[in-house]
Image (cartoon, grey):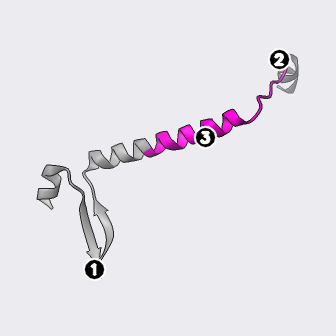
């Protein structure tokens, strides 16, 4: 495992001859999570832009408060 860490190569754990888990360097894991969050944010932004904008008049907003 130390060899995988020094080269930043993920370690693959096998169970019954099939890959069942991956061991990553913590920095690689954090980077992967950050990229996933960015992708999810872009998808949500794209969905929001496909919908028409709705505006509320200032008077109506202030009346609700």
What is the number of the mark on residue 5?
none
Structural crowding at the residue carrying mark 2, measured as other residues with C-alpha within 10 Å and reported as few (<14), some (14–19) or many (≥20):
few
- Tell me the CA gap for discs 2 and 1: 64 Å
Identify the secondary structure beneath mark 2: helix
Q: Which residue is mark 3?
A: 44
Q: Which residue is mark 2?
A: 58
Going by the image, does 18 lie left or right of 8?
A: right
What is the number of the mark on residue 17?
1
CB contact under 8 Å: marks 1 and 3: no
Q: Quadrant of the C terminus?
A: top right
**Residue nearest the observer in this picture, 65 or 25:** 25
Structural crowding at the residue carrying mark 3, measured as other residues with C-alpha within 10 Å and reported as few (<14), some (14–19) or many (≥20):
few
Identify the secondary structure beneath mark 1: loop
Going by the image, does 37 lie left or right of 10?
A: right
**Residue 56 in magenta stretch:** yes
* Label 2 vs 3, first from the N-terminus: 3
Residue 22 position within the rendered picture, expressed as x and y whole percent measured from the top left: 30, 62
Going by the image, does 23 lie left or right of 54?
A: left
- Tell me the CA gap for discs 1 and 3: 39 Å
Q: Which one is in front in this view, the residue at disc 2 or the one at disc 3? A: 3
* Rendered residue at 37%/47% (across/down): 32
Read off the magenta span: 36-57
Residue 57 position within the rendered picture, expressed as x and y whole percent measured from the top left: 85, 19
């Amino acid at each position: 495992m130390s060899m995988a860490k020094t080269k930043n190569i993920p370690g693959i754990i096998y169970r019954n001859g099939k890959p069942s888990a991956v061991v990553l360097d913590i920095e690689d894991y954090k980077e992967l999570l950050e990229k996933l969050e960015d992708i999810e944010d872009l998808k949500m932004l794209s969905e929001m832009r496909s919908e028409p904008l709705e505006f509320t008049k200032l008077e109506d907003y202030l009346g609700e408060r």
